[in-house]
Image (cartoon, grey):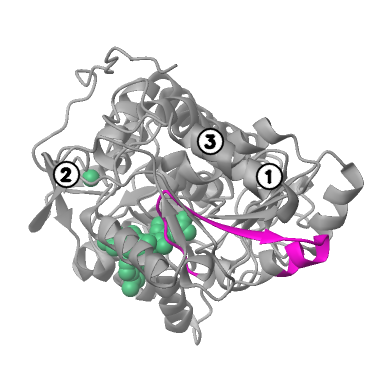
Amino acid sequence: MTFEYAPAPESRSIVSIKPKYGHFINGSFVAGKKHFPTINPATEEILSHIALGGASDVDKAVMAAQKAYTKTWSKLSGEERGKYLYRIARILQERAREFAVLETLDNGKPIRETRDIDIPLVAAHFFYHAGWADKLDYAGLGHNPKSYGVAGQIIPWNFPLLMLAWKVAPALATGNTVVLKPAETTSLTALLFAEVCQQAELPDGVVNIVTGDGSTGSAIVNHPGIHKIAFTGSTEVGKKIARAIASTDKKATLELGGKGANIVFDDAPVDETVEGIVNGIFFNQGHVCCAGSRLIVQESIAEEIIEKLKVRMAKIRVGDPLDKNTDLGAINSKEQLIKIKELSAIGDAEGAERWSPQCNLSNKGFWFAPTIFTGVTQANRIAQEEIFGPVLSVLTFRTPQEAMDKANNTPFGLSAGIWSEKGSRIFWASQHLKAGVIWANTFNKFDPASPFGGYKESGWGREGGKHGLAAYLKNGKETGAK
Ligand code: NAP
Ligand code: MG
């Protein structure tokens, strides 16, 4: 039996978007010279025009951050810094609905996710780090650990405000100041966050936001006044950054791509597992670096799991991201949609079998139906490369060791999921998987106290938890970061 859902759109009247934005430097918005449009990917409506920052804008922002660091921020006690972080966290909670609607408009992800996942986690991140600001002596990082100075932070479009929180909260808690660049397609919530900094009366220059494209990011990376870089994005750009800073004393954490495996053993609870697989790959349109984009399932139960997965996939509601009933929203950009289509076509050409449920996709905006490929082999590009869309590649195994070998056989090592009723098997598998985050009988669960990061080409260092603090402190313990 299928149910018809009446439309339940969230009102967008809570947000007011200006026609044009400048950069946020030294506590004020300053006009940009050139601008580019930012659109709603569900409708292609132009929402606003964003300033394209050049080297001189980055320079002004770094100067402001340096001044704020020496004159104000590094002189405050941890307790004082913590008060500002608590204030920001509370304002974010008060304005949560506004942030959720704006994020959904600019990014294309469903309101259910921005409202229930992104924005609550953003506030949680600020609360968590506010708590650390006056306790750094007790974080196991040595006595009186020291900040670096100005942190240059570059973030992607998949969790725009959440990635900002992952970067800004630990930087401020540890006493660093910030120059941050949001992704080209999703700058609006970062610019609203700048207003929150003003509302919280954060001292001028502690947080600076310069909008722009890859050249703006590169100007931040190469600026001599930047002491630490925190980047989340593609492995390709991560490698460029690693090369650019190789002969400098700049520190860096890099959170890059992934090709996460959801490993399903024959004793897994079937219905829960199917729900977990759906959450692992179709959450946030698969725009998730730690997505469970490969299903590695024991041969004896593969048929049953795939059959139930298809039934469940047919019930995924794809459509208006502002509708509270929507499960899967719009793909963030035309470029990303092209990339997903190209890699899926390669899957067809390599002989894998593609299946999607019937979906009525709008011809305005960027859409891709939830998709699975079965009969995938390890050598296939769809088993090796990050698709970064709602596309699942299914492989099978016979012995537990074969599952481990297949799961580890990619250039990445960010996340994995294990589905089994047997605790000893879960512990055994988690010791053999080369992945920074391993979930057992669940997937895509996040907490500010839990460190996040990967092996191999998935990046350097960890963000979140005590490990994440260490990356912003001079005598912080070794975390694998540069
Ligand atoms: P990206 O190019 O790596 O972008 C990430 C951030 O870096 C953006 O702010 C981007 O600016 C900036 N940037 C681009 N070139 C730069 C450079 N040379 N130096 C410094 N900063 C630079 O990622 P993308 O183009 O948005 O997405 C491409 C692929 O990356 C996706 O298909 C996906 O596979 C992967 N990705 C991974 C994550 C993750 O969480 N690990 C997140 C998003 C994307 P612009 O926005 O102006 O390009
Ligand atoms: Mg946009």
Label 3 SS: helix
Dot 3 amino acid type: Phe
Q: Which residue is mark 1?
A: 450
Residue at (56% x, 48% y) in the render: 170
Q: Give, as a single range, the part of the protein colored magenta.
A: 385-405
Mark 2 touching mark 3, by CB under 8 A?
A: no
Q: Which residue is mark 3?
A: 126
Mark 1 touching mark 2, by CB under 8 A?
A: no
Residue 349 in the image: state x and y as whole percent: 38, 71
Q: Is residue 233 visible?
A: no
How dense is the environment of label 2, judged by Cα within 10 Å: few (below 14), some, or many (20 and up)?
Answer: many
Q: Which residue is mark 2?
A: 39
Q: In this view, which residue lies farthest toward the bottom?
A: 247
Label 2 SS: strand
438 lies left or right of 159 = right
- Point out which mark residue 365 bears: none
Which residue is nearer to you in this view: 206 or 292? 292
Mark 2 lies within 8 Å of ligand 2 (Cβ measured): yes
Q: Quadrant of residue 398?
A: bottom right
Residue 445 inside the magenta-drawn segment? no
How dense is the environment of label 1, judged by Cα within 10 Å: few (below 14), some, or many (20 and up)?
Answer: some
Residue at (29% x, 12% y) in the render: 6
Dot 2 amino acid type: Ile
